[in-house]
Image (cartoon, rainbow, N blue to C red):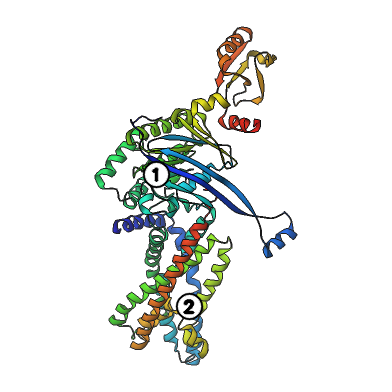
Amino acid sequence: MLRIYRRFWQVNWAEQWQYRANMIMYLLYWLVSPVVYLAVWSAVASERGSVGGLTANDFITYYLVLLLVDTLTSDITIYLLAFRIQDGTLSGELLRPVHPILTNILMNNLAFKALTFAVLVPIWIGLCLAFRPDFSGVTAGTLLLAVPAIALGFAIAFLLGATITCIAFWTTRVYALNEFYSGLILLFSGQFVPLELMPGPIQQVVLYLPFQLMKYGPVQLILGRLTPEEIARNTALSLFWLAVAALLFRWVWRNGTRRFSAVGA
Amino acid sequence: MQRNGSLGADAIIVAGLSKTYQVPEREGGLGAALRSIVRRQYRAVQAVKQIDFTIASGEVVGFLGPNGAGKTTTLKMLAGLLHPSGGSASVLGFTPWERRPDYLRRMTLVMGQRNRLSWDIPAADSFLLNQAIYRIPDDEYRATLAELDELLELAPIIRKPVRNLSLGERMKCELAAALLHRPRVLFLDEPTIGLDITAQARIRGFLQEYNRRTGATILLTSHYMADVTALCERIIMIHHGVLKYDGGLAELSRRIAPFKLIGVALRDGASVDLLRYGTPVAGENGDGKRLVQVPANEVAAITARMLSELPVQDLTIEDPPIEDVIERDFHEE
């Protein structure tokens, strides 16, 4: 099995490399909004001293770490697979004796991540030089704890993304659904604003949803802003949502492939 | 055409196999478009209706029928891509649409030219990926690849990115990728479509040789009569999803195509009434010859008469296109 993953990695890495120019354009586009949030919130906070208890440095460190975490946990399955379900080219992969999503698509995601991350790092260092963050809360311990947290965050995002993608077996309008889902992530993962700025009752709900486990949770963990109890709660929640996502995915995949009509190819 | 001695047990057993598609449908125009948002109209299309057949291990069978007859749908069900609406099928003892890895490792389906190769990388890399996916041991992989290279002359092309290959080259690589794991059962949907005559003949020869060497069972569809006559002794024919014929190729030819087409080009654009020689066929073939349909057993005599009586510049004798023959047969029913 390891050999299968290695080969899928090689193929997908080679493919990503073919599209590196594309990828850089995408990355620049994708960088715009977090950098704008960073600049705006830190400017507001430094003018007023703090916003909702967060200082300018809190915002700067939050968004800078978010940039890295977001790259590591985000999922692009819908862009890799939905059109192949619709035009029937998924057929070729269904003929193979391995699960297409859990091998090929997973490795494609990871190859994309690796390349994006490699390009992001120098840009990120540049941003650090420009905004001069104070990372004093970050320790070796929080970085170490972040590794499983980020892995779980990605696993949840990947399986939920794959679940949404598989809705394409039922409808050709799956991209609209995905827009809605992306909206939920933007709002509730902490991408738009750090979740502590959300109104109290909403915050209480959002902290139990899967979205914050993809971004806000790991970022806070790295910055040393979570108590041991919160870390334990997030880990338990992650395992819970991972199980839910896995069950959902299994269900849509099984029923979706039964409906698959392999049109065109 | 069984060449490897004895036929084994049944490799493919199909009983009452059916497939009905639900196709969304609407009239043209804005009103209909709006209505279809609220309530979609579906029409049930029965692509395959209760077909039965059995294919012995090692047999090569031609699967024929006009466009839309249900050939591809049947192949897709047998390859496990589609769930049937009814009936059963067993291939090598497996139910195809359960898509068990043990089944998928033993069969292959070749459709068109865009199945198994990644577009952006050389075919050699896709082959290595297949080696891992199908768990082919290194020495076996090398031996099979060498054999495929010998039959298909792959060496000059497998290092180029697939996107830069010609259609024929890509088809060769597709076939190689589909056969690296030495499948016991091959489903081939138009394996020579879009290829020139030389490439067609090469692929044909290759399939023949593969069947001889490995004793694999092959079920293939083709629009080219030459594919079928070269490879298959047995024909299964379907039309509108119903099984119409299952038997020998020779008998089918006698039954439905007891005639040939003679194409003639005359010198200096001479015009002559071809009715004297047979039934003129509307239109010309590709190279400007006029076509006459004649009974198969009179071809020699009629050709001799034409050559002595007419200012013939060029003359060809062709089999009628298989699709035409089948279509004609079904219309006459």
Q: Residue at x 33, y 83 (%)?
A: A138
* Amino acid type of the residue that numbered disc 2 sits on in the rendered structure: Gln
* Disc 2: host chain: A
Vertically, is B43 above or below B158? below
Give the position of the N terminus of chain B as an image quadrant. top left
Q: Residue at x 29, y 44 (%)?
A: B141
Residue B28: x %, y % from top left? 72, 54
| Left or right: B51, with B101 as reference point | right
Tag 2 secondary structure = loop
Disc 1 + disc 2, Cβ < 8 Å: no
Which quadrant, please, contains the C terminus of chain B? Answer: top right
Q: Which mark is residue A191?
A: 2
Task: Determine the chain carrying the residue at label 1.
Answer: B
Judge by depth and name the residue closer to the eye, B116 or B314: B116
Asked whether B272 or B111 is in front, the reply is B111
Disc on res. B178: 1
Quick check: can you spot residue B125? Answer: yes
Residue B44 picture location, percent across and down:
63, 52
- Would residue B19 appear left or right of A63 to someone viewing this image? right
